[in-house]
Image (tube, rainbow, N blue to C red):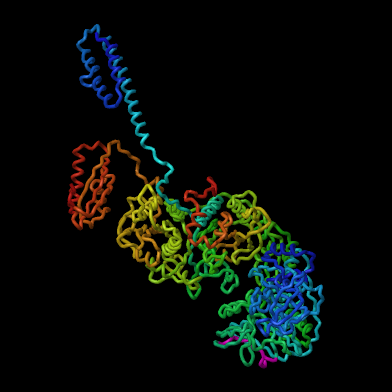
């Protein structure tokens, strides 16, 4: 909503200056977002004099003028107007000016080879007249050169953010009322009008009784023998200050009344109406051409203002060209109606129309303002364009939706924290337009018709607090008492995992929950992707089903910037369906490039699957899972290298999945043009980590240490390559769980001297006796047992 | 009786002249070995006359002690010089770089969530969460924002289907509803999380983060709301003086509603929070609307309280001087490393919120 101090003063008797008004408006909830000089742009446009005008050397129809723009400055301007001549006082717009008619910004430009520094304006270009012929001719004196052409454009306007609950403040009078209530002046009374309205409107109006009828009341006045013309200066300026274009007195008046009283009006050229006005539900595929020059095809049950020939316009939204007023219009019908908010909103959404009238009707117009609007509009039109007005015709009636609200005085202090007197309540609410009646302890309040937002006592309490001032609310220090643990188990896990992965060298990324479907499908097992209905762009069209999608896209961007040794992770939701809750929390990390790139101390090498496996395992350890519970298997997903990836699961290979890890499939790396040899990644399913019932300290066995020497023995076997190291380790460990503490693989070899299909594997076994020192004999026996079990179970041979 | 003095001086002379460890080893054998000088002398004790035995033994023991002592010193000397010799050859260029390691970082959004959580934990709030995909009911209707209400235009919504009943939550406020539905008052919760609006330019990102706060009990009034937010702002910006302004506003799910501005000034090109006469909007809040309480079966005659919603990304930008919101989500490693936090830098009350 835009207004200015002078406009406000039409309704408010106040001595306050602009700054005081601005401050107060913000304090009472009408936030002033912007104050601007109403038209800096128009201030640029000045009076000039053509010193010399001659023919453009390269064009017959153009002139080249030397123009005096004041302060001794002479500029060259190329001009097409025939009336540009020596000694003429004219209107000059310098480069940088936005031309009101075209909204084009002037630039210094070469026209047929000669630079033109600005423009000499026609009335048409300045939106002052429809006369396109020639430039404006002024009757001025030398001393006027350089003066502003537009007078009084200097008044500042305020842009006020009106919250959707305050339709009344979409009119200047509503804002004035709030200011008056807050003590910054007096709301001026609206004077009764005295117009002789003798005849009955010749145009019959009817509202059809239909289900879902969008119009409640239709008021109108017929004005005959008007002479439509340009609005007077003051009105034009107000219209321009609203960001609108002055069109004609009749149209400008309807706009003015809308912004002045929050009362939309519409003017029809009465002679273009076919017999009568019928307000009815539209029928599918009816159409009309609207004042925005677009043709709209309607659906069933939209509120159509129509005549015998068809739809004229959409009630409360936009009028049609067929019945539009023109300068030649002789007789008009001025409409002031009430349309229900909900159908207005529905229709405008479907047709995608946004107008100032629609914006107001969907928020709720004062149903009692119909006559007021007709009066003000009619008076202004009669004043400017002459003519004779008919009696008002107001048809239809709507139910008064207002309820009397019981307000208990104590409730105010209970909710707000400070007390208010009955007298203050009375004063504030009456000044806002409420009617009050004291009834014992309660106050019975009937809100005004222009405040559809006030429905219950809390609404009144808000009004009182707002006008009293939020600074009056006391400050009560918070209590430091906890009702519940701050974080639950899952939340603690989240925070722990996040910092655990970061501490391994990964940098945290936060990426969007949506991603590019073509990338996401590479990492997805969903049957159908989760599409957004209205994505912001075509490459952010689905909810991600994997954290890899965005991580890989991010990695690619960084790699292409030559940051090739990269460790990134993200923790957050992935989506499995489009219903609430069909999501799970993951932590995923990727690693690309080399370890020890260009380092003197170690040979550089690509990051490999064992780096990523360790990172995943250690993270699981750190968030509380013992290695003994984690089983590694070669189960994998399609987005990994099939031979260099695996699964960490809980308890057994078929247990709950904790994490996948491995090399990202080479064909994905190629397809996404990552320009790196290797991308490693892990993804941990945080939701699958079971909550321990007991604390770590409660779960731990007793601390027992052995006083006896531990013993190490090495073994080497040649074994069928199908046996994994994990199998061998668990096989050996099972032989004597008490005695064998650690089995550590220290060499794996395939190649020369080993038959194909076989591998050599060497491991070191740690024996930790509990009750005695191991004798040579004891050690021999357990060694023999290890050898025989491995040989028997796997067919391996001991390597000498 | 043997001349012990003579024997001693002979031995000491020999030791003195030794100049390497291996000769010292053989001298030690010559003295204490199976047939060593002193070993032989001890063997004699048994054959001596009772009257001389005592004096002999005492002199011999004194000799043994002295020689052992001297030998030990000599061994230490040789050991030390051996080490010294080795150290001379073990000099390296210590300014050479060591092995590579990667220092990970925590994203500013995560860090600020932890900071904020730490602050609210101090005053008794616990953390709740809700899904990113919401139904139209939880996101709007239950929050007193009926269909076809213009308030819905305030938030450009991402929808998941044509019928528009499934959407990406436009604020964290649906967590209020979910929390109150699943349990009984009192409620004192915060809910940080991802939020989405179909809007993208310099200052808007289609995804951003919010922190919801909700405190419902029997006597929680607007003064408590004010006190809570003053406390929060002071703690978060780690300043003593705060300038805060509560300005009336409108949210369908709170009444009265307020927007909160914080005072700031620009000094030497840097923003200073808590001083100056400029205002910056940082959050929206208000007393929970009775209709919201009714929707979650909490009796508004018995219970009342406040709710607030803060933009986490915006807080991070203000506190850490970050200009561009969109950069938060672009994963440029240079940005992440520059603005990121050390993983060990966990915000806590006792260790300080930030370093």
Q: Quadrant of residue A160?
A: bottom right
- Can residue A51 be found in the magenta stretch? no
Along the line of sight, the residue nearer the viewer: A379 or A74: A74
- Is any atom of residue A369 visible in this view? no
**Magenta residues (range):** A271-283
Along the line of sight, the residue nearer the viewer: A33 or A130: A130
Residue A115 picture location, percent across and down? 66, 75
Count of marks, rendered view: 0
Residue B248 picture location, percent across and down? 66, 63
Picture quarter with the N terminus of chain B: top left
Q: Is residue A167 above or below residue B217?
A: below
Residue A669 picture location, percent across and down? 37, 64
- Can residue A280 be found in the magenta stretch? yes
- Is any atom of residue A469 visible in this view? yes
Residue at 52%, 58% in the rendered image = B192
Lateral position of residue A767 relative to residue B139, left or right: left
Q: Is residue A233 above or below residue B325?
A: below
Residue at 34%, 25% in the rendered image = B77
Question: Among all residues in the image, which is located at the extreme front?
Answer: A57
Residue A620 picture location, percent across and down? 38, 53
Q: Is residue A198 above or below residue A512?
A: below
């Amino acid at each position: 909503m835009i207004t200015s101090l002078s406009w406000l003063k039409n309704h408010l008797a106040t001595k306050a200056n602009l700054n005081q008004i601005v401050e107060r408006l913000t304090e009472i909830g009408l936030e002033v977002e912007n104050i601007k000089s109403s038209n800096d742009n128009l201030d640029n446009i000045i009076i000039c004099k053509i010193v010399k005008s001659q023919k453009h050397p390269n064009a017959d129809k153009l002139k080249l003028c030397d123009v005096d723009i004041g302060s001794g400055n002479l500029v060259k301007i190329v001009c097409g107007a025939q009336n540009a001549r020596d000694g003429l006082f004219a209107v000059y717009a310098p480069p940088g000016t936005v031309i009101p008619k075209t909204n084009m910004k002037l630039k210094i430009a070469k026209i047929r080879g000669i630079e033109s520094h600005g423009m000499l304006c026609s009335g048409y270009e300045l939106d002052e007249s429809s006369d396109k012929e020639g430039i404006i001719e002024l009757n001025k004196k030398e001393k006027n050169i350089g003066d502003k052409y537009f007078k009084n454009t200097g008044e500042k306007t305020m842009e006020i953010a009106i919250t959707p609950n305050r339709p009344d403040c979409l009119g200047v009078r509503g804002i004035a009322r709030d200011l008056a209530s807050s003590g910054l002046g007096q709301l001026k009374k609206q004077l009764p009008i005295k117009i002789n309205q003798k005849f009955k409107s010749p145009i019959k109006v009817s509202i059809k009784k239909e289900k879902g009828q969008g119009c409640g009341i239709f008021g109108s006045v017929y004005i005959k023998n008007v002479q439509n013309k340009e609005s007077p200066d003051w009105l034009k300026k107000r219209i321009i200050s609203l960001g609108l274009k002055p069109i004609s007195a009749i149209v400008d008046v309807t706009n003015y009344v809308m912004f002045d009283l929050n009362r939309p009006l519409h003017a029809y050229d009465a002679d273009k109406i076919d017999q009568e006005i019928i307000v009815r539900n539209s029928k599918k595929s009816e159409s009309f051409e609207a004042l925005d020059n677009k043709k709209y095809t309607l659906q069933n049950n939209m509120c159509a203002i129509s005549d015998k020939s068809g739809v004229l316009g959409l009630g409360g939204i936009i009028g049609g060209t067929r019945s539009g007023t023109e300068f030649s219009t002789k007789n008009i019908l001025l409409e002031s109606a009430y349309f229900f908010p909900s159908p207005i909103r529905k229709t405008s959404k479907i047709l995608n129309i946004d107008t100032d009238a629609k914006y107001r009707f969907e928020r709720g117009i004062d149903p009692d303002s119909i006559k007021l609007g007709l009066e003000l509009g009619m008076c202004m039109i009669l004043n400017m364009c002459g003519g004779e007005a008919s009696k008002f015709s107001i048809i239809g009636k709507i139910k008064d939706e207002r309820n009397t609200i019981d307000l208990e005085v104590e409730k105010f202090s209970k909710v707000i924290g400070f007390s208010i007197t009955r007298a203050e309540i009375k004063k504030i609410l009456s000044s806002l337009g409420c009617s009050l009646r004291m009834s014992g302890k309660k106050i019975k309040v009937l809100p005004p018709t222009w405040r559809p937002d006030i429905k219950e006592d809390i609404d009144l309490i808000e009004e009182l607090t707002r006008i009293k001032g939020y600074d009056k609310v006391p400050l009560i220090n918070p209590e430091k008492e906890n009702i519940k643990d701050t974080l639950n188990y899952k939340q603690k896990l989240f925070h722990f995992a996040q910092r655990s992965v970061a501490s391994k060298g990964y940098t945290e990324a936060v990426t969007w929950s949506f991603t590019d479907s073509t990338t996401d499908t590479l990492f997805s097992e969903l049957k159908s992707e989760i599409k957004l209905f209205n994505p912001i762009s075509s490459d952010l069209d689905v909810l991600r089903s994997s954290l890899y999608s965005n991580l890989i896209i991010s990695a690619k961007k960084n790699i292409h910037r030559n940051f090739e040794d990269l460790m990134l992770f993200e923790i957050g939701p992935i989506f499995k369906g489009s219903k609430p809750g069909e999501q799970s929390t993951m932590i995923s990390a990727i690693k690309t490039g080399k370890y020890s790139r260009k380092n003197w101390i170690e040979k550089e090498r690509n990051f490999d699957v064992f780096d990523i496996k360790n990172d995943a395992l250690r993270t699981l350890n750190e968030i509380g899972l013992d290695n003994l519970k984690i089983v590694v298997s070669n189960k994998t997903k399609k987005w990994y290298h099939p031979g260099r990836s695996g699964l960490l699961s809980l308890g057994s290979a078929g247990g709950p999945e904790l994490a996948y890890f491995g090399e990202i499939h080479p064909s994905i790396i190629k397809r996404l043009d990552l320009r790196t040899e290797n991308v490693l990644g892990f993804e941990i399913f945080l939701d699958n980590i079971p909550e321990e019932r007991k604390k770590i300290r409660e779960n731990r066995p007793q601390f027992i240490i052995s006083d006896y020497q531990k013993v190490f023995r090495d073994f080497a076997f040649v074994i069928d390559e199908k046996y994994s190291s994990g199998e061998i380790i668990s096989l050996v460990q099972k032989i004597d769980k008490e005695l064998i503490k650690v089995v550590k693989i220290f060499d794996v070899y395939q190649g020369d001297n080993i038959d194909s299909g076989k591998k050599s594997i060497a491991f070191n076994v740690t024996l930790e006796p509990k009750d005695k020192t191991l004798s040579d004999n004891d050690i021999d026996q357990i060694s023999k047992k290890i050898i025989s079990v491995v040989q028997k179970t796997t067919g391996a041979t001991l390597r000498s | 009786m043997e001349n012990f003095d003579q024997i001693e001086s002979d031995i000491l002379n020999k030791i003195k002249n030794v100049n390497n460890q291996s000769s010292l080893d053989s001298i030690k054998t010559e003295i204490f070995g199976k047939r060593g000088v002193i070993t032989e002398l001890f063997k004699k004790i048994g054959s001596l006359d009772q009257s001389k035995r005592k004096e002999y033994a005492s002199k011999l023991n004194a000799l043994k002690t002295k020689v052992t002592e001297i030998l030990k010193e000599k061994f230490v000397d040789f050991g030390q010089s051996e080490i010294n010799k080795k150290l001379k050859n073990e000099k390296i260029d210590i300014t050479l770089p060591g092995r590579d390691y990667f220092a990970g970082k925590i994203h500013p959004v995560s860090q600020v969530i932890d900071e904020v959580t730490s602050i609210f934990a101090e005053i008794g709030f616990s953390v709740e969460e809700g899904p990113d995909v919401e139904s139209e009911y939880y996101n709007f209707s239950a929050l007193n924002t009926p269909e076809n209400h213009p308030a819905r235009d305030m938030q450009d919504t991402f929808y998941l289907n044509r019928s528009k009943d499934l959407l990406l939550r436009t604020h964290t406020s649906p967590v209020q509803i979910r929390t109150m539905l699943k349990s009984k008052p009192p409620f004192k919760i915060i809910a940080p999380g991802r939020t989405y609006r179909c809007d993208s330019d310099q200052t808007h990102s289609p995804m951003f983060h919010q922190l919801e706060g909700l405190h419902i009990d029997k006597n929680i009034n607007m003064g408590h709301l004010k006190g809570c937010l003053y406390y929060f702002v002071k703690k978060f910006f780690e300043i003593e003086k705060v300038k805060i302004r509560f300005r009336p506003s409108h949210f369908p799910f709170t009444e009265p509603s307020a927007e909160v501005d914080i005072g700031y000034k620009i000094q030497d090109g840097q923003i200073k929070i808590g001083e100056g006469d400029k205002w910056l909007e940082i959050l929206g809040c208000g007393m929970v609307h009775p209709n919201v309480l009714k929707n979650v079966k909490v009796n508004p005659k018995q219970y009342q309280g406040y709710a607030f919603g803060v933009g986490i990304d915006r807080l991070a930008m203000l506190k850490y001087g970050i200009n561009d919101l969109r950069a938060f989500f672009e994963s440029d490693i240079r940005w992440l490393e520059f603005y990121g936090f050390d993983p060990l830098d966990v915000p806590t009350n006792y260790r300080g919120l930030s370093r």
